[in-house]
Amino acid sequence: MINNTFEVMAEESARIQQKLLKGLENVLQVGDVETGVTPHETVYQDDKIKVYHYKPTGGKVMPAPVPVLVVYALVNRQYMMDIQQDRSLFKKLLEAGNDLYVIDWGYPSKMDKYLTMEDYILGYLDNIVDFVCKRTGNEKINIMGVCQGGTFSFIYSALFPEKVRNLVLMVTPIDFDTRDGLLNVWSKVIDIDLMVDTMGNIPGELMNFGFLWLKPFQLILDKYVGLLDNMDDPNIVQNFLRMEKWIFDSPDQAGETIRKFVKDLYQENKLVKGEFVLGGRRVDLEKITMPILNVYGEIDHLVPPYSSCCVEKIVASKDVTTKAFPLGHIGMYVSSRSQKDLAPLISQWLADRSIVPSDTVGEVKTERFTSHRSPRISKGITKDAKQKGHRRVVGPKSLPAS
Amino acid sequence: MEEKSQNRIDVTARLAEGQREFWDNWMKATIKGTDAVQSMWREQVTPDMLTMWSQTWLKSSIEPFVGKEPSEGVDGIVNKRLTEASTIYNNLFAFWTKGNQLLAQLSTGTAPTTEKLKEIHDQWIKEYQTVIGSLWGISPSRDAEKTARTFQSTTTASAESGWRFMEPLLKNMEELPEILTRISKGDTGAGNELTGLLRKNYEATLGKLLGAPTMGYFREFQDKINHTADAYVNYNSALTRYFVPFYQSGMGAAEKVFQRFSEFNGKEVTPETFNEFYQFWWKTNEDVYGQMLGSADFTELLGEVLQQGLTFKKHLDDLSDQFMRFTNLPTKQDMDEIYKTIYELKKEVRSQKRSIKDLEHRLETTVARTTPIASKRIVQKPS
């Protein structure tokens, strides 16, 4: 048996060495990995924030395309949802006929340490929504919020329900009072005031370090051991490197924003209690009346299911669809399950709620939103708005760049 | 001529007599010195032996020449200084020997108590003072001797202050051997106690010094240095406690893995079995560490480490800024002021832009509202 064991070990060792050599060759040849592969153009920029418009692929045509604005989190980069050709949620949504706009929050520098949540939600996000509305000629648009971006979108929808037609939430933390996730547990003991006063912006490297320690052995060790077994396949190496690039591509967090986010949400859970105030305005969840699609992962270690699944209980909306997938946080974007089931679910759900009924044209006409005017500043509908009427769009249209 | 011859005979006789006396005294001195040594040799050897021997030999050697009573005046002083000078080396040797004897009291197999150490310390200081005191006999003047003796009294006070600084440290270290023994036996809680002990020592000694108020021209700068050093110690102390649960979890996981490993005993070793073992190994560690990372104890330690680490960084940044002020480069504070100003200016510009757009729109609306009326009036004007 001893001889047999040595023979087996020797064979295995030789096999691994061959794999490693081939893998090394693949790694050296792979070059710079591409991410964010679906064609898009920059249509808006404000400071470091950009908005990309993803060009329709000419697939299924929707009768009245209400654009979808994707609001990603600040803690990572949005190209995760477009990481590679065969794992792109954006591509699937485009193929289903959606008109997609995506926010790129950029990389905050030290100069941005004073940016607040008000600046992000009441400033940047509101301006972007106004821009998309104006560009597409819509009074309201669909918003798809992902993770922390979902929390922002949720808050925005409560403050500006008149601008949001449908709200899609993906793996979005709403109720932070749970011990199911390590982030929720650890955030209770973090002196965020001291952290922000000392560091200013919270470095992306620090955030990464914390995320790695949520599952240390899997993320620091097993992931790479798994790669060893498949290093001889160049496609697997490329896919791995794309994911690796995204995982460690974490922007710094603007100090004042993360201060409020951790204090008011993670530590004091003010949002679900109805005590969350933004820009002097209390975020009243009863104002959320638009249809909501709430999607979350059942094995999500970053945003535990408890944190996401409370939405239907706390909003006034009568049309709330909650859907759980047996996936983790990242799996929601890149798994084959998400490609097969999630994208069609979102597209169909939006399509069912984005068509403007013909007998409500008159109403829509009176609700027509004209540019330059923010509902916060003035009320009432101008004659101009009534005269212009609502354009009923059939088929995809190309809009002039603003 | 006879007188001259008689004089030459007298001088020669006196010289011979003097030589004969010197030789007699020399013999007496040598015999007395030898007797003294031989008598001492028969007794028990003690550290003072050399001192006693040299003093005895000196006395017995010089006495025949100068008599029992040393003369007064310059002769007496010089004689005294010559004889006392040679005793310095004897005193130093005696001090060294006694010091070794005192230290020998420490190695009795058990850790000495603070009281025992104080006793040894006091004895040593006393011997030291004796040695120093013996030096003053060769001072060039009485004033110099007085100054030297005043200095000697201050060294006594310094020694006492030094002891007061060390005493709490030594008192706390009495627990050290027991803690080290428990650590070697695998008691992981003892690790925590060790860091706590070091922390106690720090707070009783250097910590007090660093926390004391500073004075003088460089008061603020010194304050920053002291606070940074204190913060660093606190951070290290917290970090040491922080790693204890990692060690404990590692040991716990290793135990589980070992139990499972024993199940592989006798089985054929293949890549599949090794893979199975590896999967079990990392998943077991993941579970154990996962539980530890979510526990209340670890969370508290995490909060403590972050708190101390950030406090240390804050002080270090302040200190760095202080150094930067010596150069021509902008400090962190300067840059923060600039960033804040830029941020507020941008916000103001956005607000103004929004207001301008709103005013433009109102203007457009007003114009649009008034224009049809104006046209109507024009149309209805009589021709």
Image (tube, helix red, strand yellow):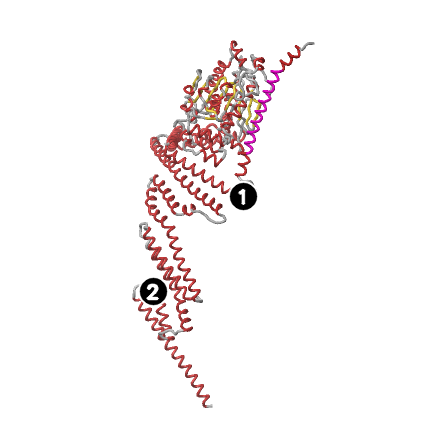
Q: Name the quarter where the C terminus of chain B is drawn.
A: top right
What chain letter is assigned to the residue under label 1?
A: B
Q: Nearer the viewer, residue B4 or B42?
A: B4
Q: Amino acid at mark 2?
A: Met
Does residue B292 appear left or right of residue A333 in this picture?
left
- The Cα atoms of the two marked residues, 1 and 2, are separated by 65 Å
Task: Name the foreground residue: B229 vs B183.
Answer: B229
Location of residue A86 with respect to A217 vertically, above or below: above
Q: Secondary structure at mark 1?
A: helix
Say whether residue B269 is visible: no
Nearer the observer: mark 1 or 2; the answer is 1
**Which span is picked out in magenta?**
B341-370
Please tell me whether mark 2 sits on a helix, a strand or a loop: helix
- The dot on residue B325 is 1
Is residue A316 something that shows in the picture? Answer: yes
Say which of B289 and A151 sits in front.
Answer: A151
- In the image, which disc is placed on residue B292? none
